[in-house]
Image (tube, rainbow, N blue to C red):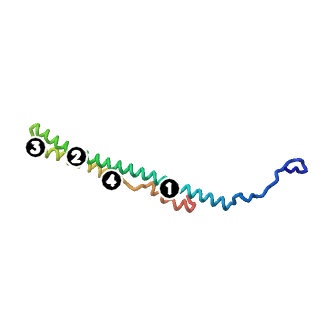
Amino acid sequence: MAIDAAGSSRTPVRGPAPDDPTIGRLVADATRDISTLVSKEIELAKSELKVSVKAGGLGIGLLAGAAFIAVLGVIMLSFTIVYFIAWAGLGLHWSFLIVTGFWFLVTALLGFIGVKKLKQVGPPEKAIEQGREIPKALKGKS
C-alpha cells in the first residue's frame, strides 16, 4: 500500500491479469449459455408435451368408448321401454312407434336449441377493434 502526502492510504491500480476474460469472451459465453438454456427449455417442453399428448389421447379414447357404450345403453333402454309399454297392453308395433316418436321429438328439440344458440354467435368484435388499433399504436398515434 502506498501512502500519499496527506497521509491516506491508496490501493495501487493494477492492470488486467492475463487470465481475466475479455468483454468479447464474456459476451460469447453469455450467448452460448443463453442458447443452451433455450434449447434445454425446448427439450423440456417437448417431453412434457409428449406426456400430455399421450394422456390426452388416452383420455379421448376412453371418452369415445364411454360414448359408444352410452349409445348402446340408450338403444337397450329404448327396447326395454318398448317392451314395458307392450306388456302394459299396447301392441308391440305401437310401442315401437311411441318410443321412436319420443326420440325424434328429443332430436328436434335439441336441434332447434342448437340452431338458436349458433345464431347468437358473432365475430369477436373487441379483438377486431384492438387489431385495428395496432397500426396506429405502431405509428405512435393514440
The disc, 1 or 4, on the residue closer to the chain's N-terminal end is 1
Q: Nearer the viewer, residue 26 or 116?
A: 26
Q: Mark 3 or mark 2: which is in front?
A: 2
Q: Earlier in the sequence, mark 3 or mark 2?
A: 2
Q: Earlier in the sequence, mark 3 or mark 1?
A: 1
Q: Amino acid at mark 3?
A: Leu
Extreme residue in the right direction: 5
Marks 1 and 4 sit apart, C-alpha to C-alpha, by 42 Å
As measured in the structure, the alpha-carbon distance from the residue carrying label 3 to the one carrying label 4 is 41 Å
Question: How far across and how far down the image is residue 115, in percent?
Answer: 29, 52
Which mark is nearer the camera, 2 or 1? 1
Q: Foreground: 78 or 1?
A: 1
For residue 125, side relative to residue 26 (left or right): left
Between tags 3 and 1, which lies in front?
1
Say which amino acid is labelled 1. Answer: Ile
Q: Which residue is mark 3?
A: 92
**Residue 77 horizontal/vertical position (percent):** 20, 42
* In the image: residue 27, left or right of residue 72: right
Amino acid on which the number 4 mark rests in the picture: Lys
**How far is disc 3 from disc 2 in space, using C-alphas?**
21 Å
Which residue lies under the disc numbered 4? 119
Mark 3 Cα-neighbour bin, 10 Å: few <14, some 14–19, many ≥20: some
The location of residue 37, given as percent across then percent down, is 56, 55
Residue underneath mark 1: 42
Mark 2 — residue? 72
